[in-house]
Image: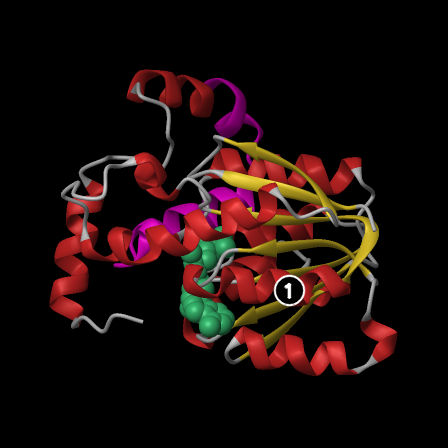
Amino acid sequence: MTIINEEQQQNQMAGHKQLRHKSLLQSDALYQYILETSVYPREHESLKELRELTEKHPWNLLATPPDEGQLLGMLLKLINAKNTMEIGVYTGYSLLSTALALPSDGKILALDINREYYELGLPVIEKAGVAHKIDFREGPALPLLDQLIKEEKNKGTFDFIFVDADKDNYLNYHNRVIELVKVGGMIAYDNTLWNGSVVAPPDAPLLDYIKYYRDFVIELNQALAVDSRVEICQLPVGDGITLCRRII
Ligand SMILES: C[S@@+](CC[C@H](N)C(=O)[O-])C[C@H]1O[C@@H](n2cnc3c(N)ncnc32)[C@H](O)[C@@H]1O
């Protein structure tokens, strides 16, 4: 992984923020229309609170956008998900969207290397009355997944797994979560259009972190396209989300 200092990272994020939002829609007005017509009026008050709290955090661009949170909630209800996993929590917007969509005995195994981010959002999650559904584990996700796979009883038990962490490990995650999701269950990979950079020419002037992760995202997309263990559907929601339904 490329190591850049905090100042460089913040400069890059500031550049990224000039894009104003995380949607791939070419028109800001159209995206605002979706948010104001279909998303904000139905956004749970705790999600709104968490979104507004997260907007004040310097890394707020990491957060799942509200239209994508709405999509996740809808999908989880459609598939009657109960046992789920999330890799990459940050302050918890997608986590809270998931927790609110699951039944009261639903479960989310939530993995992140950074507990501090999670703890920023935790009071809002607690206030929403859904913290009991969450089992947060701090640490790099790969070894945690390897531990889970070691136990046969965990295999094929998850209804839904949302992957939204370090993009250079997405294929490593895929090769593990495919064993943990049940046949008929769903894995969702976030950022699979990676700020539109998947179609940028090789010499395009991209921000360093976009450029670095781009090849990993392209590699994942190519691998998913030919993976006979899953059916896929890539949607231009948020920064691109690819849904995979395990079929064997
Ligand atoms: C894009 S953010 C997740 C956004 C979150 N889903 C939301 O709704 O706001 C990515 C998260 O992945 C975490 N992360 C990065 N590398 C990781 C790793 N190797 N294992 C676990 N988590 C990791 C980061 O700490 C960060 O919180």
Which quarter of the image is occupied by the N terminus?
bottom left
Q: How many marks?
A: 1
Residue placed most toward the observer, 154 or 205: 205
Q: What type is the residue that disc 1 sits on?
A: Asn
Residue 49 vs 155, above or below: the answer is above
Q: Residue at x 14, y 43 (%)?
A: 205
Name which quarter of the figure residue 71 lies in. top right
Q: Tell me which image quadrant ligand 1 sits in.
A: bottom left
The magenta stretch spans which residues? 37-61
CA neighbours of label 1 inside 10 A, class few (<14), some (14 to 19), many (20+) = few
Label 1 sits on a secondary structure element that is helix
Residue 155 vs residue 170: left or right? Answer: right
Residue 16 vs 143, above or below: the answer is above
SS majority, magenta: helix
Residue placed most toward the observer, 47 or 238: 238
**Residue 195: where, in percent of width, then height?**
33, 40
Residue 38 among magenta residues? yes
